[in-house]
Amino acid sequence: MNLDIVSLPDNFDRLESLDTLILFMNKLTISNEIKKLKRLRQLKYLGLLGNNITASDIIELKRSIPGITINPDLR
């Protein structure tokens, strides 16, 4: 939360059992990180408020990780 993160580490997808991830108020462009996030198949909650995220990013994540809750849930 609010760590000025601009990108996720390349090996981030190794956290395969992660079920909650809060990335509020960073400097992530989610479209650049979506490939890594989509590999976290156990993710149930993803907090992205305060980052650069689009409705297309949300749709792609929800399609890849069934049952995920994303905040904010842009429509």
Image (tube, helix red, strand yellow):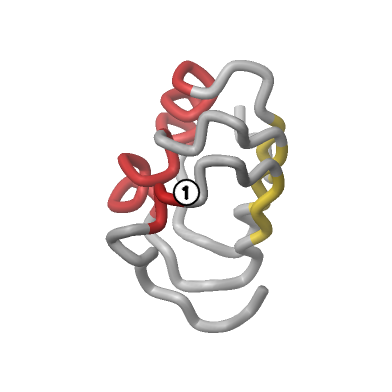
Identify which residue, 47 or 49, lies in the foreground: 47
Query: Is disc 1 surrounded by few (<14), some (14 to 19) or many (20+) residues within 10 Å?
Result: some
Give the quadrant of the N terminus: bottom right
31 shown above or below 51? above
Q: Position of residue 15 (x, y in %)?
A: 51, 50
Q: Position of residue 41 (x, y in %)?
A: 52, 29
Q: Residue at x 54, y 72 (%)?
A: 26
20 shown above or below 67? below
Q: How many marks?
A: 1
Give the quadrant of the C terminus: top right
Q: Residue at x 60, y 41 (%)?
A: 17
Mark 1 — residue? Answer: 53
- In this picture, residue 31 sits left or right of residue 62: left
Q: Image quadrant of residue 46?
A: top right
Q: Residue at x 62, y 71 (%)?
A: 25
- Residue type at mark 1 is Ile
Q: Position of residue 55 (x, y in %)?
A: 49, 33
- In this picture, residue 62 sits left or right of residue 22: left
23 shown above or below 55? below
Identify which residue, 49 or 3, lies in the foreground: 3
Q: Position of residue 35 (x, y in %)?
A: 31, 40
Q: Image quadrant of residue 24?
A: bottom right
Q: Residue at x 50, y 82 (%)?
A: 4
- In this picture, residue 45 sits left or right of residue 32: right
Q: Secondary structure at mark 1?
A: loop
